[in-house]
């Protein structure tokens, strides 16, 4: 049988046809893949401006040399396509004052940072301002730069900072602290036995985390009505003003004598002032925002004039194991605006149980709060003298309803605004003109008292 021979070029034709088919196939696939790539992943060559969550990042006012909490900046890409930021860096070139974190990485310069279309980038900024060795509050400026392919944008960085004298351990004998520059307590700070620490008017004392001041010698705080000395937590950003329990507070030990705290504001402590078998005069003092107590005494001698105690979870004032306590023209008020007291009975507690005699003298004071009993007594040997006070009490109504004391008065008209820590008296307050004349002629603000005076620390 005769077989028709194959054409000489048939194999070549088959080869080229197959090649063309493969090229055509992969080209189509490439076009499909390209067409399927999301538009927001394709980089634009001429991006519109980035949008920032803040025009400026501001820290107000921090302690120089001490790290503070970070702030967040969101960077938005308004383009439908992805944008590549060529470089993110500090424009001032001063990397000692600010720290930048992007994608959990810390660096001085970030390069080729991508943001998908309609997406955002989170930038973490921390201030770590250097000590400038100057007394006045100063400003630290910089700019966070974003360099794109067609433009450069920036976000301003601004921090107010102040230098401090850092103190720790045992202080020099007979030290004098002035208002020239604040003091930062770190760890345990001790006034040694036989020595006196004198604090002048308007002096600022900041406390680092869990710091404590132990007084084994003497403490003399000489503030004035218009220039209080201030003890507080070192963080000054919004939200920290009324923080509870950030540091330990002042501890007046058994060996300490002749302690005086005049016109001082002590806040943010666990126990603002603890008097351990010692003695102290508090005049014009404000003790506020404590996680345990604003004032506590154990077998102590505590004399108080024109003082304001407020905002403590457990107690405003607790006395135990005997001692002598005299309060004249003081306001002790405790509410639950910022915490739950969990029905902890009595902001003020005099507990003599098993300790011998306790002397308690109360004149022209306000003992108030949101609980039914804001003052309690325990023990058989409390020698109590109380006149012309205002009490919120149910348990001790019969004991305290004497000597022109007022019980359970209308709460709404007693103070101006307890929620704002304003315990001055409104014109309708039942405390006005209900006091008894004493040797105290001015109030906590230095205002002259009338005769008869108003009850509490503030004269109307």
Image: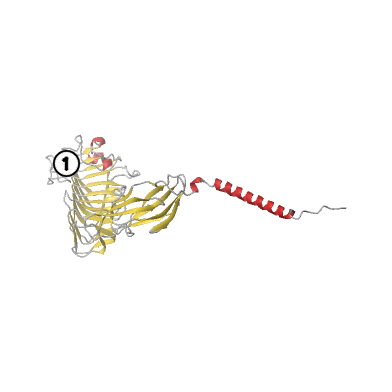
| Nearer to us in this view, 416 or 271 | 416
Question: Seen from this angle, which residue lies furthest front?
Answer: 8
- Numbered disc 1: secondary structure: loop
Horizontal and vertical percent for residue 233?
28, 53
| Nearer to us in this view, 27 or 48 | 27
Using a 10 Å C-alpha cutoff, classify the residue at mark 1 as few (fewer than 14 neighbours), some (14 to 19) or many (20 or more). Answer: many
The coloring applied to the image is secondary structure
Horizontal and vertical percent for residue 236?
29, 51
| Nearer to us in this view, 164 or 111 | 111
Q: Is residue 434 above or below residue 204?
A: above
Quadrant of the rendered structure where residue 5 is?
bottom right
Which residue is found at the position 14% from the left and 44% from the top? 447
Relative placement, left or right, of 99 versus 317 is right
**Quadrant containing the C terminus in the rendered view:** top left
Q: Is residue 379 at all visible to an observer of this figure?
A: no
Q: Is residue 412 above or below residue 3?
A: above
Q: Is residue 380 above or below residue 411?
A: below
Relative placement, left or right, of 52 versus 395 is right
| Nearer to us in this view, 390 or 185 | 185
Q: Is residue 27 at all visible to an observer of this figure?
A: yes
Which residue is found at the position 73% from the left and 55% from the top? 11
Residue hosting label 1: 459
What is the tally of numbered marks visible in this picture? 1
Horizontal and vertical percent for residue 276?
25, 57
Horizontal and vertical percent for residue 441?
12, 45
């Amino acid at each position: 049988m005769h077989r028709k021979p194959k054409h000489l070029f048939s194999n070549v034709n088959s080869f080229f046809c197959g090649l063309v088919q493969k090229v055509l196939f992969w080209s189509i696939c490439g076009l499909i893949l390209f067409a399927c790539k999301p538009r927001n992943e394709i980089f634009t060559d001429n991006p519109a401006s980035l949008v920032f969550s803040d025009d400026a990042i501001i820290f107000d006012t921090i302690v120089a040399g001490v790290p503070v909490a970070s702030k967040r900046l969101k960077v938005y890409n308004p383009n439908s396509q992805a944008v590549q930021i060529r470089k993110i860096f500090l424009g001032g070139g001063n990397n000692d004052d600010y720290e930048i974190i992007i994608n959990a990485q810390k660096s001085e310069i970030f390069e080729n940072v991508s943001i998908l279309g309609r997406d955002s980038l989170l930038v973490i900024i921390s201030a770590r301002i250097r000590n400038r060795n100057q007394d006045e509050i100063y400003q630290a400026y910089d700019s966070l730069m974003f360099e794109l392919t067609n433009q450069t944008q920036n976000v301003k960085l601004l921090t107010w900072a102040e230098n401090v004298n850092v103190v720790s351990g045992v202080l020099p004998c007979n030290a004098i602290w002035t208002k020239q520059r604040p003091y930062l307590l770190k760890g345990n700070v001790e006034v040694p036995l036989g020595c006196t620490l004198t604090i002048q008017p308007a002096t600022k004392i900041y406390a680092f985390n869990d710091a404590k001041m132990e007084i084994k010698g003497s403490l003399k705080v000489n503030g004035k009505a218009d220039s209080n000395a201030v003890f507080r937590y070192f963080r000054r950003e919004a939200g920290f003003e009324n923080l509870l329990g950030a540091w330990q507070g002042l501890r007046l030990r058994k060996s300490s004598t002749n302690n005086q705290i005049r016109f001082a504001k002590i806040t943010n402590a666990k126990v603002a002032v603890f008097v351990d078998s010692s003695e102290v005069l508090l005049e014009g003092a404000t003790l506020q925002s404590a996680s345990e107590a604003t004032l506590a005494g154990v077998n102590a001698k505590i004399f108080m004039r024109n003082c304001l105690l407020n905002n403590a979870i457990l107690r405003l004032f607790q006395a135990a194991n005997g001692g002598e306590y005299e309060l004249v023209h003081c306001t002790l008020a405790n509410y639950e605006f910022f915490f739950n007291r969990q029905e902890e009975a009595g902001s003020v507690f005099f507990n003599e149980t098993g300790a011998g005699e306790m002397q308690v003298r109360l004149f022209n004071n306000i003992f108030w709060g949101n609980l039914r009993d804001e003052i309690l007594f325990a023990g058989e040997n409390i020698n109590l003298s109380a006149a012309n006070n205002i009490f919120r009490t149910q348990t001790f109504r019969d004991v305290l309803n004497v000597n022109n004391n007022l019980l359970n008065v209308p709460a709404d008209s007693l103070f101006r605004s307890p929620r704002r820590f304003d315990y001055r008296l409104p014109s309708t307050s039942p405390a006005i003109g209900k006091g008894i004349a004493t040797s105290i002629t001015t109030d906590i603000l230095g205002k002259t008292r009338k005769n008869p005076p108003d009850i509490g620390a503030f004269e109307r």
